[in-house]
Amino acid sequence: MTYLVRLVVAGVVALLVLSFATAARADGTSREAGKHFQRGVELYNEGDFRGALVEFKKAYTVWPRANVLYDIGQTEYQLLDYASSLKTMERYLAETGPNAVHRSEVENTVEVLRGRVGRIALSADASDCEVTIDDQAAGTTPLLQPIAVSIGARRINITCNGRPAASRQVDVAAGETVRVDLKLPQQPAVISRSGALTPLPPVRHRPTKQSLAIGWAVTSVLAAATIGLGAATLVEQSQLSGLKHQFPVTKEQLDGKASLTSGLSIATDALGVAALAMAGVSTYLTVKYERERKTFRLSFSGSQVALGATF
């Protein structure tokens, strides 16, 4: 019996210690949240709405309470971020009861905000890309639902690994759903001073010394082969001419020699054409190499200045 009593007492003591520890942590958390909330109120009253929003959100993160959502929504309203304010106010209504202090006011505010919000239905040709609207995270492609945004000019950006970013600015009216189809560039892009994305020109491959050496080596081989076959063709033609004046000579001998001579002549012509073509290519590459080796380019395009030099 004594053992049972001790066990019960020990259990009660453990529960009390756990309760006090939990209460102490909760009290510390609530004090931290209270500090952030009070600082947010001070900043709000001073007109620093962005600073107040940071403090209110921090207070809610540390100690989530529905009444803080009211202050967050009001601050977002002052910043003209109607879409975020509408979302926050709707959360406030969902997390509070019918007798909440600000419920009637928030319900009226929600009706006003719904007249200041539109939507963007965004589609892109790549998946797993980060989407931002006015530098605020809006999700990852593909987006299954239209995004609620404040009315006015909105800037959409899509960033995807391995591909240049894409950007578009659209005007959104109240209650309107704007459909935007963004295609990401396949090649790198530069950003002009105006913020617009401009694709870079395609990469141009310059001829190298090695490629020039190979080109002229092939040209020399083809030229030598042409000369060699040409000489052999002349010899065969001379022998064919001699056979025609010899006696006795058979028709088979004349036909065989004529066939060999014709074949050598055709091969000589083909090699000659190939040698000329290769010589033309090698000459073009040589001229291009020498020209680009000391090219200095300076170009202007609108508000952009491009400067490039190769040596």
Image (tube, helix red, strand yellow):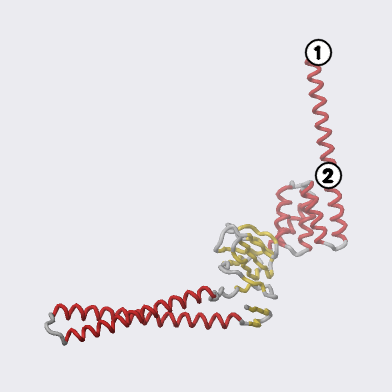
Residue at horizontal 77 percent and vertical 63 percent from the top: 79
Q: Between residues 55 and 102, which one lies in front from this camera angle?
A: 55
Front of the two marks 2 and 1: 1
> Left or right of 42: which side holds 285?
left
What residue does disc 2 label?
Answer: 30
Dot 2: few (<14), some (14–19), or many (≥20) neighbours within 10 Å? some
Which of 130 and 51 lies nearest the eye of the viewer?
130
Q: 206 and 25: which one is in front? A: 206
Q: Which mark is residue 78?
A: none
**Which residue does the image show at 84% across and 62% down from the upper left?**
48
Residue 2: mark in rendering: 1
Horizontal placement of 292 versus 9: left or right? left
Question: In terms of sequence position, does the residue under pointer 2 or pointer 1 come before the other?
Answer: 1
Q: Residue at the front extreme?
A: 247
Identity of the residue drawn at 65% across and 66% down:
156
Q: Position of residue 165 (x, y in %)?
A: 62, 66
- x, y percent for residue 208: 54, 75
Q: Residue shown at 52%/73% (left/top)?
A: 210
Q: Position of residue 292 (x, y in %)?
A: 58, 81
Q: Quadrant of the C terminus?
A: bottom right
The image shows residue 161, relative to residue 96, as above or below, that is: below
On screen, residue 261 versus residue 119, left or right, reads left
**Mark 2 is on which residue type?**
Ser
